[in-house]
C-alpha cells in the first residue's frame, strides 16, 4: 500500500483509486497487508518510546504487539506511526492507522462526538503532585499558598485550580509551554510544587538534578483512564483490541506468564485451558486462531509482566502498581472472564 | 676677497642612512590595539569626548567579560563537569551513581547520550544493515554538488543534468528501495495522456494549417514520454533492495532531504513565479500573485498541519498519502513563494533602459530574460536567495510537529527513552544540534559571499 502511495506522490495519480477500494473490515485489511499499523506517541517514557536501535517499547506498544501476536502469531508484525497529540485522532479517522495506542484519556466527548471507541483501559492515570522532601509536606492538603509549576493550556492547569478552590487553599500558578521547561523551573526552585499526570511525574523526576530529594504526594486529583482506541463501526476489530487487553489481564490473574505458558497448556484448570485455546473456540469468534491468547502471553507476556518491564519499580521510572494492580490485589484492573 | 670654498664644494651623500625602527606604539600589536581599542577610550578633552570614552570603556570591558563568561560556562558544562562514558542514562544521574558521579556533584554535558545515539541522530530509524544506502547516496551526491559549486570544474551542463535529473531518481531508489509496485493502470494512464497530446497536435496541424507543428511538437512529446516511462520503469524495477518506508527516515538525513528538495525546487519555481507576477498577461499575473500571496500569507506550521490533519479527511478511508511527500510539497511550494518575491526584487532593480535596449536589438522576451535581465537580477539578490535557503533549511525542523523525525525531532524522541532519562541530556543535545546547524548554515553563507565577490562587476561598495 505504502509503496503505491509513494509512487502517487511522484505523479502517478491513478494507481491509488483501485488499490484503496478494499474495505472489507479492518481485520481483513490488516491480514491482507500483513501487519498492524499502530499509532503511538512521539515518545513518552515507559508507554511508547524508541530505543537507540529504533525498536519501540512500552506499555502502549505492548498492546499493539499483543494484537500482532493474536492475529499473525508474531508480535513483531507491527508498524508504528508516531503521532503528535493533535493529529492522533485524524490519523485514526482517516484510516492511516488501525489502532491508536497512545496514552489517550477515555472521555465522553472522544467516545461519542469524535466517533471513536475505547477498547479498555491499560493504565489508570491521574494528576499528582511532586514536592521537595525538605518542604516536609506529606499531603496535598498542606499545600496552601504554594507556587505550582504546570503546563499552560492543559486540563492539568484547570484541575489544579479546581482542587485548590475546592479545598479552600490559595496558590500561585507558574505555567510553561513545554514539559522540559516546567521541570527546569521546578528544579531551579521557582515553584514549590510540580504537577502533571502521575506517570509523567515519575519520568520527569529523573530529569531533576537530585531526584532523590523529591517525593510524589499520595493524592491523585483527576481521573485519566488511558487505553487503546479504534474507529467506531467495526465491532470485530473493536472486539479484538478489547480482548487482547483482557487476555493479558486475565493471564496475570491466572498466574500465566511468558515463562510458564507452555506448561499451562496441560493445566487442569478449565479457565486456563479456555484462555490458552485448548478448550472452546474463542479465537475463532474473534476472527483469529484459537491459540491467540497463547501467542500474546508467550511473546508479549501478561499485563503484570508488561507493567514490570516498562514502568514498574525495577525500571528507572519506578512506578508502583497502586490502582493498576489486579482487583484481587487491591487495584481496579479487572477483565471479564473468557467463557 | 676670496670665495668661501665650502659653498662651492657640494655635499653628496653616497650611502643611505640606515632605517631607524619605527617609534614604539606605531606598528605591530600595540599600534593595532591603540588604534582599534584604546584610542577611543582615552580622549577626555571635552565633555562630549569624555562621555564617549567612558562609554567605550564600559562596552569594551563588558564585551570581554561576556565572551569570557560564555566560554567559561561552555567549558565547564561541556568539558569540566561533562560525563564522557556510560551506557545508559544512569551514568548521568547523580542519584544512582555507578561510582562515577558523587551525589550532589554538578552534572555537565552527557556526551554518551550523543555518541550512543549518533547513528540514530544521523539516520533516524532507518534499519542499520541498510544504512550503507544513505552513505552511498551522500557519496554520489557530494562530487556532483561540488562540481556545480566550484567554478573551475568544467562540464557544468552535463553536471546539472546528472544532479537535477539522474541524481534524484538514483537517490529515491537508493533511499526507499525502489520496486514501488506501480500499478499497470498508471502506465496505461500516461500512455493515454501522451497519445491524447499527439492526437491534439495532429488535429491542430490539420485544422489550422500550421505545417510542421506535429513533426516538431511530436518529437518533444515522444522524448518526454520515453523519459517518463523510463523513470516509471526504474522506480518500478526490483533492484533487490529492501523497501524502507519514509516513516523510518529521519535524523540529519531527513533534514537534508527536505532542505535540498526545497532548495532545488524553490529557485526555478520562484523565478517562474517572479516572471509570472511581472507578466503583461493578466491571467498569468493574477495566478502568480494569488499563489505567492496565499503561500506567504499563511504560516508554514499551519500548512504542514493542514497537509497532515485535513488532507487525509478529503481522501477516501484507507487512502493515505505519504507524509514525507506531503511535507516535501508543502516546504517546496512555501519557499518558492518567498523565492519569487526575492527574485522579483532583483528584477525591479534592473533599469528600464536594459529592457528597452534589448527590445531595440530585436531580442525576444525569453532572450531578454535569459541574456540581459535575469543574470543581472539574480546577481543582485544573491544575499536574499541564500537568506531564503538558510531560512528554509532551519524551517525544516517544523516537520517534527507532523510526526516526522527530523534532526531536531529525533533528539526530542531520544530524550524520552526510559533508559536515557537524565537532567542534562536536552542541553547536551541542543549544543550538538546547534553546532551541526551552524556548520551547514555558515557554509552556505560563506559560499554566497564567495559567489558575490566572483560576480561583482562594479556594483560593489
Image (cartoon, coloured by chain):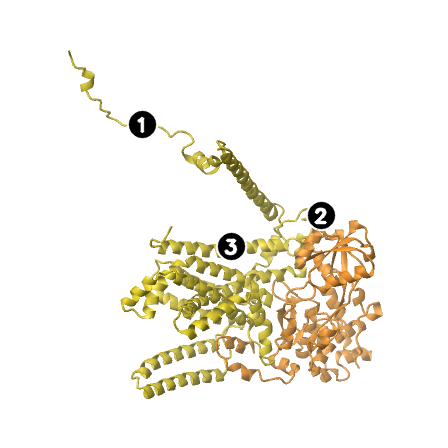
Asked whether B144 or B302 is in front, the reply is: B302
Q: Are marks 2 and 1 on the same chain?
A: yes
Q: CA distance from mark 1 to mark 3?
A: 52 Å
Which chain does the residue under circle 3 lie in? B
Q: Quadrant of the N terminus of chain B?
A: top left
Q: CA distance from mark 2 to mark 3?
A: 35 Å
Relative vertical location of residue B226 with respect to residue B261 in this rendering, above or below? below
Say what secondary structure mark 2 lies in.
Answer: loop
Relative vertical location of residue B73 with respect to residue A73 in this rendering, above or below? above
Q: Which residue is identified by label 1? A: B18
Asked whether A143 or A248 is in front, the reply is: A143
Q: Which residue is identified by label 2? A: B103
Task: Name the side, left or right, on which A50 lies relative to A226.
Answer: left
Which chain does the residue under circle 2 lie in? B
Task: Look at the numbered discs 1 and 3 and tell me whether their residues touch, using CB distance below 8 Å.
Answer: no
Output the letter for the chain in orange: A
Amino acid at each position: 500500500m505504502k509503496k503505491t502511495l509513494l509512487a502517487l506522490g511522484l505523479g502517478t495519480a491513478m494507481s491509488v483509486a483501485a488499490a484503496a477500494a478494499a474495505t472489507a473490515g479492518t481485520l481483513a485489511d490488516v491480514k491482507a497487508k500483513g501487519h498492524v499499523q499502530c499509532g503511538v506517541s512521539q515518545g513518552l517514557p515507559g508507554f511508547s518510546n524508541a530505543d537507540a536501535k529504533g525498536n519501540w517499547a512500552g506499555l502502549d506498544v505492548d498492546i499493539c504487539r499483543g494484537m500482532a501476536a493474536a492475529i499473525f502469531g508474531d508480535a513483531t508484525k507491527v508498524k508504528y506511526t508516531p503521532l503528535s497529540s493533535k493529529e492522533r485522532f485524524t490519523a485514526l479517522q482517516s484510516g492511516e492507522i488501525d489502532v491508536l495506542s497512545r496514552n489517550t484519556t477515555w472521555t465522553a466527548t472522544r467516545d461519542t462526538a469524535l466517533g471513536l471507541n475505547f477498547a479498555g483501559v491499560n493504565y489508570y492515570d491521574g494528576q499528582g503532585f511532586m514536592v521537595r522532601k525538605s518542604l516536609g509536606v506529606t499531603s496535598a492538603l498542606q499545600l496552601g499558598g504554594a507556587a505550582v509549576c504546570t503546563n499552560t493550556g492543559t486540563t492539568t492547569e484547570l484541575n489544579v485550580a479546581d482542587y485548590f478552590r475546592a479545598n479552600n487553599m490559595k496558590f500561585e500558578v507558574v505555567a510553561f509551554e513545554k514539559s522540559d521547561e516546567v521541570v527546569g523551573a521546578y528544579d531551579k526552585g521557582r515553584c514549590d510544587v510540580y504537577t502533571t499526570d502521575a506517570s509523567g511525574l515519575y519520568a520527569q523526576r529523573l530529569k531533576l538534578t537530585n531526584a532523590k530529594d523529591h517525593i510524589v504526594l499520595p493524592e491523585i486529583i483527576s481521573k485519566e483512564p488511558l487505553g487503546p482506541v479504534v474507529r467506531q463501526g467495526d465491532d470485530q476489530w473493536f472486539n479484538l483490541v478489547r480482548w487482547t487487553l483482557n487476555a493479558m489481564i486475565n493471564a496475570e490473574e491466572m498466574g500465566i506468564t511468558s515463562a510458564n505458558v507452555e506448561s499451562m497448556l496441560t493445566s487442569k484448570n478449565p479457565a486456563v485451558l479456555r484462555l490458552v485455546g485448548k478448550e472452546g473456540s474463542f479465537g475463532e469468534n474473534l476472527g483469529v486462531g484459537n491459540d491467540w491468547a497463547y501467542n500474546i502471553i508467550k511473546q508479549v507476556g501478561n499485563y503484570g509482566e508488561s507493567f514490570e518491564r516498562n514502568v514498574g519499580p525495577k525500571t528507572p521510572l519506578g512506578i508502583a502498581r497502586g490502582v493498576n494492580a489486579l482487583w484481587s490485589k487491591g487495584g481496579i484492573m479487572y477483565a471479564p472472564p473468557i467463557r | 676677497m676670496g670665495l668661501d670654498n665650502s659653498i662651492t664644494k657640494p655635499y653628496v651623500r653616497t650611502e643611505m642612512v640606515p632605517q631607524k625602527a619605527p617609534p614604539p606604539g606605531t606598528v605591530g600589536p600595540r599600534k593595532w590595539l591603540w588604534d582599534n581599542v584604546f584610542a577611543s577610550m582615552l580622549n577626555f578633552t571635552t565633555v562630549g569626548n569624555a562621555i564617549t570614552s567612558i562609554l567605550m570603556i564600559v562596552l569594551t570591558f563588558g564585551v570581554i567579560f561576556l565572551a569570557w563568561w560564555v566560554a567559561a560556562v561552555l567549558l565547564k558544562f561541556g568539558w569540566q563537569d561533562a560525563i564522557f562514558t556510560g551506557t545508559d542514562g544512569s551514568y548521568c544521574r547523580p542519584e544512582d551513581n555507578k561510582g562515577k558521579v558523587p551525589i550532589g556533584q554538578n552534572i555537565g554535558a552527557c556526551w554518551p547520550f550523543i555518541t550512543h545515539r549518533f547513528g540514530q541522530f544521523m539516520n533516524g530509524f532507518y534499519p542499520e544493515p541498510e544504512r550503507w544506502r544513505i552513505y552511498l547516496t551522500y557519496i554520489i551526491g557530494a562530487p556532483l554538488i561540488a562540481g556545480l559549486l566550484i567554478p573551475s570544474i568544467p562540464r557544468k551542463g552535463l553536471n546539472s543534468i546528472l544532479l537535477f535529473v539522474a541524481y534524484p531518481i538514483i537517490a529515491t531508489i537508493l533511499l526507499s528501495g525502489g520496486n514501488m509496485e506501480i500499478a499497470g493502470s498508471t502506465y496505461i494512464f500516461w500512455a493515454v495522456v501522451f497519445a491524447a497530446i499527439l492526437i491534439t497536435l495532429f488535429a491542430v496541424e490539420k485544422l489550422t494549417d500550421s505545417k510542421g507543428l506535429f513533426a516538431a511538437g511530436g518529437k518533444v512529446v515522444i522524448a518526454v514520454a520515453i523519459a517518463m516511462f523510463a523513470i516509471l520503469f526504474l522506480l518500478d524495477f526490483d533492484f533487490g533492495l529492501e523497501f524502507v518506508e519514509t516513516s523510518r527516515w529521519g535524523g540529519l538525513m531527513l533534514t537534508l532531504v527536505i532542505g535540498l528538495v526545497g532548495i532545488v525546487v524553490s529557485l526555478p519555481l520562484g523565478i517562474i513565479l517572479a516572471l509570472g507576477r511581472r507578466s503583461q498577461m493578466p491571467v498569468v499575473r493574477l495566478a502568480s500573485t494569488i499563489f505567492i500571496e496565499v503561500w506567504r500569507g499563511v504560516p508554514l506550521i499551519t500548512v504542514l498541519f493542514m497537509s497532515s490533519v485535513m488532507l487525509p479527511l478529503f481522501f477516501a478511508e484507507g487512502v493515505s498519502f505519504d507524509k514525507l511527500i506531503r511535507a516535501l510539497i508543502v516546504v517546496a511550494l512555501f519557499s518558492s513563494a518567498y523565492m519569487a518575491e526575492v527574485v522579483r526584487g532583483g528584477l525591479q532593480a534592473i533599469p528600464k533602459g536594459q529592457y528597452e535596449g534589448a527590445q531595440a536589438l530585436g531580442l525576444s522576451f525569453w532572450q531578454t530574460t535569459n541574456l540581459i535581465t535575469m543574470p543581472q537580477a539574480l546577481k543582485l539578490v544573491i544575499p536574499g536567495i541564500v537568506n531564503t535557503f538558510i531560512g528554509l533549511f532551519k524551517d525544516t525542523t517544523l516537520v517534527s510537529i507532523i510526526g516526522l523525525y527530523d534532526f531536531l525531532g529525533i533528539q526530542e524522541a531520544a530524550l524520552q527513552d526510559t533508559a536515557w532519562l537524565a537532567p542534562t541530556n536536552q542541553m547536551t543535545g541542543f549544543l550538538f544540534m546547534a553546532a551541526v546547524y551552524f556548520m551547514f548554515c555558515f557554509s552556505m553563507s560563506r559560499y554566497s559571499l564567495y559567489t558575490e565577490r566572483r560576480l561583482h562587476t562594479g556594483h560593489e561598495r
